[in-house]
Image: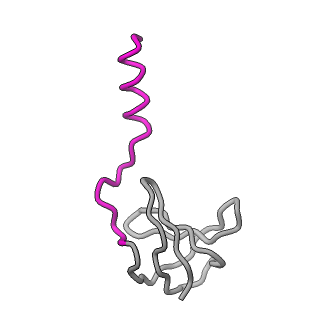
Amino acid sequence: MSDTSNEQYRNNNTQSNFTNKPVQLGKEYTVQITETSYKGDGVARVQGFVIFVKDGKVGNDVKIKITSIGNRFAKADLI
């Protein structure tokens, strides 16, 4: 592959499938914690979009507030 092809390949494979995020900064959502991250945070999803929930425990239905949004995931606090 040429340098241009390599760059295009990397860009295509690192782009998120979420051009419009299904969550908004500062908004509250009710979610279910389905997993634990390697850092110990709970993991929930809104329309497939990953949200790391500080102090979230697997199996709990919780109300959260979005504190930050990245390209591939968001972070939230329990309310």
Q: Is residue 78 above or below residue 74?
A: below
Tally the marks: 0
- Using the rendered view, name the quadrant where residue 11 is placed: top left
Residue stretch in magenta: 1-24
Residue positioned most to the left:
20
Query: Is 36 displayed left or right of 1 in the figure?
Result: right
Residue 74, position in %: x, y? Answer: 48, 65
Residue visible at 45% across and 58% down in the picture:
70
User: Is residue 20 covered in magenta?
Assistant: yes
Query: Is 36 displayed left or right of 76 in the figure?
Result: right
Residue visible at 43% across and 29% down in the picture:
10
Colouring mode (rainbow / by chain / secondary structure / one colour): one colour
Query: Is 29 displayed left or right of 35 in the figure?
Result: left
Residue visible at 36% across and 18% down in the picture:
5
User: Is residue 12 covered in magenta?
Assistant: yes
Of residues 51 and 26, the one nearer the viewer is 26
- Using the rendered view, name the quadrant where residue 39 is placed: bottom right
Quarter that holds the N terminus: top left
Residue visible at 38% across and 80% down in the picture:
27
Residue 66, position in %: x, y? Answer: 46, 75
Residue 43, position in %: x, y? Answer: 57, 68
Residue 68, position in %: x, y? Answer: 47, 67
